[in-house]
Amino acid sequence: MEQKTRFFFTMLICAVLTFVLTFSGMAAEVDEPVLILEAPIEDSTALVLSAPEDSTALVVGDVEDGEEPFQSKKIGQWLDKTFYKLDYAVFKAFSKIQSETMTKIVELVTHLGDSEIAIPLLIVGLIMAFFKKTRKVGLTLFFAIILGTLFTNVILKNVCGRARPYVTLANDPDFMSWYQMANAHKESDNSFPSGHTTCAFEMGMALFLSMKNKKIKWIFPVLAFAVLLTRIYLMVHYVTDVAAGFIVGTTVAILAYFIVKKILSVEKIANFDLAEKIKKKA
């Protein structure tokens, strides 16, 4: 009963957040276009170009010699236009809490969603799967990271092709001043969904769902939410990017939890314990 209640409330949060973000953006009048101009502002490294006639993509991005400019696809453009007012209002709100001290703290916290954290945890999860006591946690963590990476980094980022805020808003002086205040971090991949947020929630929710210790497991979703906030503060993601990352990360963690539950229903797998095998050989 407890598991069903936990699952219900987790899915309810996802549904409510999706509903609010979608209808907030659709209700806003987007009369003014997203601020993408013909020439970059002074001292900006972003090159913003207009798409040629009959083109299905808008060409934007950081361009170096010999490199092709980033192709912002139709889904990315739709997201920029539909949620412009919402995304920009959130950036403006975050700009009011910016300070050098806060930026340093945020830069530390945001690393909790790095692949440098996820990859070692993926390996640890796989190792934990060989031992009966830790199998449930290890397998849930392992599958959540695999699924989250697949859906966000391999599929959604490439399908949506949304440019980063500092590229699309390169000619907005207010945004660029906020971005510079946050130390102007640059990322190498697309913006939607947020990879750091997906990663933080796939790991955090996987641990929350699979761990027995009720006092400790709440820490992980809280840390994941902190990572979500850092991505907006650093101006490297729109609020819609991190909302999508939250939904994907939470969803794959729930999916991983039930996959593992099904796997462990096989008695032979559930009862295998490498520790016992080692003891017998010793």
Image (cartoon, helix red, strand yellow):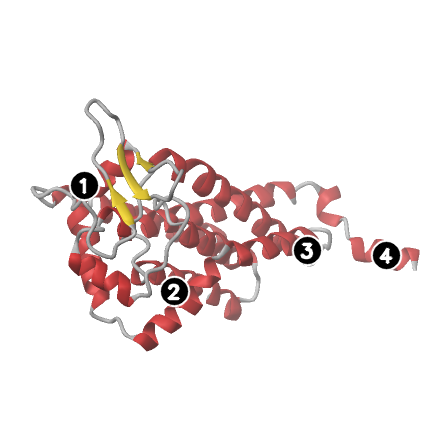
Residue at the front extreme of this rendering: 65
> Mark 1 = which residue?
82
Of pointers 4 and 2, the one earlier in the residue sequence? 2
What's the distance in space between the residues labelled 4 and 2, CA to CA? 41 Å
| Mark 1 neighbour class, 10 Å CA radius: few under 14, some 14 to 19, many 20 or more | many
**What amino acid is at disc 4?**
Ile
What's the distance in space between the residues labelled 1 and 4, CA to CA? 59 Å
| Mark 2 neighbour class, 10 Å CA radius: few under 14, some 14 to 19, many 20 or more | some
Q: Is residue 5 visible?
A: no
Residue 226 disc label: 2
**What amino acid is at disc 2?**
Ala
**What amino acid is at disc 3?**
Met
- For the point 21% across and 22% down, the residue is 54
Badge 4 element: helix
Q: Is residue 142 left or right of residue 87?
A: right
Badge 1 element: helix
| Mark 4 neighbour class, 10 Å CA radius: few under 14, some 14 to 19, many 20 or more | few
> Mark 3 = which residue?
128
- Residue 212 lies, in percent from the top left, at 57, 62
- Residue 122 lies, in percent from the top left, at 60, 52
Q: Is residue 27 left or right of residue 95?
A: left
